[in-house]
Image: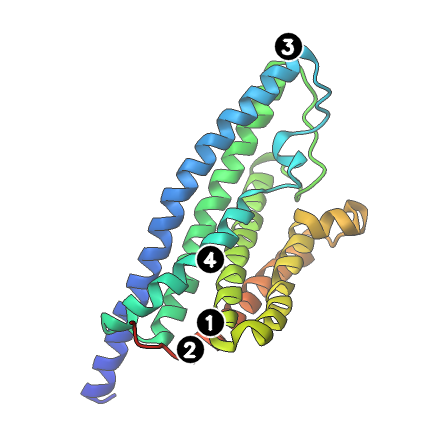
């Protein structure tokens, strides 16, 4: 490897680390506020159900079809890479390093969201038990014992990373292709989100298909990994050829 090639590779790696750090920092900041508010609201719903009998017949997260955090991740994915792209390039980064770093940041952020989701579900189940209420979970992979908790962390990590990258792909598609072709690209970008829903037994697609028609655990995890890879490709392909216009 020549010295020039080594320097280029090192610069790309630095750029990727910066892009990943930006992703994780923003997701952690927004995610902390989101989950704090969600936990307070969920606890109020469960306690209110115990005192006033509101008719809650399933877990609060399950009533949201297994994971509402995917929606704020989708929005952040649409905003963060697009907003950071010009600054990243101006600081000496490349479009490629932004794509790589964004995928890395999405995976780390997804793992954090997956862990928080599993911890929340454990807490929700314990609160239901404290009030002698049955805890029912229709959406999501089985959560029995330590293996079930680990499975939940992994599956929720996959869906969180996928939705962030889907948002990034949507934004990159519009940025690179314009309004008309970008709208067509949006339809393709949503495919990994639908696949992640089916694979993890959560989300709108799982509701439409029905829990009884969803794939098994191993096939689901494989599908979740494919969803992340497909979303990363759909983001990286257009963003690496985005034309930056001079600022006015």
Disc ID at residue 152: none
| Picture coordinates of residue 191, whole percent (x, y) | 65, 64
Q: In the picture provided, is 145 more to the left or to the right than 54?
A: left
Q: Which residue is mark 3?
A: 51
Q: In the picture provided, is 162 more to the left or to the right than 56?
A: left
| Picture coordinates of residue 24, whole percent (x, y) | 36, 52
Q: Residue at x 80, y 51 (%)?
A: 213
Looking at the picture, tell me which residue is in the foreground, 223 or 60: 60
Q: Residue at x 63, y 38 (%)?
A: 143
50 in relation to 238, above or below: above
- Mark 4 or mark 2, earlier in chain: 4
- Mark 2 or mark 1, earlier in chain: 1
| Picture coordinates of residue 7, whole percent (x, y) | 21, 80
Q: CA distance from mark 2 to mark 1?
A: 7 Å
- Mark 4 or mark 3, earlier in chain: 3
Within 10 Å of disc 3 (Cα), the crowding (few <14, some 14-19, many 20+) is few
Render colour scheme = rainbow
Q: Residue at x 66, y 58 (%)?
A: 194
Q: Which residue is mark 1?
A: 175
Secondary structure at badge 3 equals helix
227 in relation to 145, above or below: below
Q: Residue at x 47, y 35 (%)?
A: 35
* Image depth: mark 1 or mark 3 in front: 1
Within 10 Å of disc 2 (Cα), the crowding (few <14, some 14-19, many 20+) is some
Q: Quadrant of residue 126?
A: top right
Q: CA distance from mark 4 to mark 2?
A: 17 Å
Q: In the picture provided, is 6 more to the left or to the right than 84?
A: left
Disc ID at residue 77: 4
Secondary structure at badge 4 equals helix
Q: CA distance from mark 4 to mark 3?
A: 40 Å
Q: Which residue is mark 2?
A: 242
């Amino acid at each position: 490897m020549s010295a020039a090639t080594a320097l280029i590779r090192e610069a790309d790696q630095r750029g990727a680390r910066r892009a990943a750090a930006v992703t994780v920092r923003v997701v952690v900041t927004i995610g902390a506020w989101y989950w704090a508010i969600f936990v307070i609201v969920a606890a109020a719903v469960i306690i209110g159900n115990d005192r006033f009998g509101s008719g809650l017949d399933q877990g609060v997260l399950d009533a949201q079809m297994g994971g509402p955090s995917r929606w704020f991740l989708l929005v952040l994915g649409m905003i963060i890479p697009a907003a950071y792209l010009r600054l990243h390039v101006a600081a000496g980064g490349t479009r490629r390093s932004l794509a790589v770093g964004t995928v890395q940041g999405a995976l780390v952020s997804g793992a954090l969201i997956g862990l928080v989701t599993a911890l929340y579900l454990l807490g929700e189940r314990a609160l239901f038990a404290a009030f002698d209420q049955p805890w029912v979970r229709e959406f999501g992979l089985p959560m029995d014992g330590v293996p079930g908790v680990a499975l939940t962390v992994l599956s929720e990590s996959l869906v969180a990373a996928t939705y962030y990258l889907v948002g990034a792909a949507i934004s990159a598609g519009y940025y690179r292709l314009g309004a008309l072709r970008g709208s067509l690209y949006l339809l393709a970008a949503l495919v990994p989100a639908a696949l992640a829903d089916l694979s993890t037994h959560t989300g709108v697609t799982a509701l439409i298909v029905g829990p009884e028609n969803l794939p098994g655990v191993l096939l689901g995890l494989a599908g979740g990994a494919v969803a992340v890879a497909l979303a990363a490709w759909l983001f990286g392909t257009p963003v690496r050829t985005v034309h930056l216009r001079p600022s006015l």
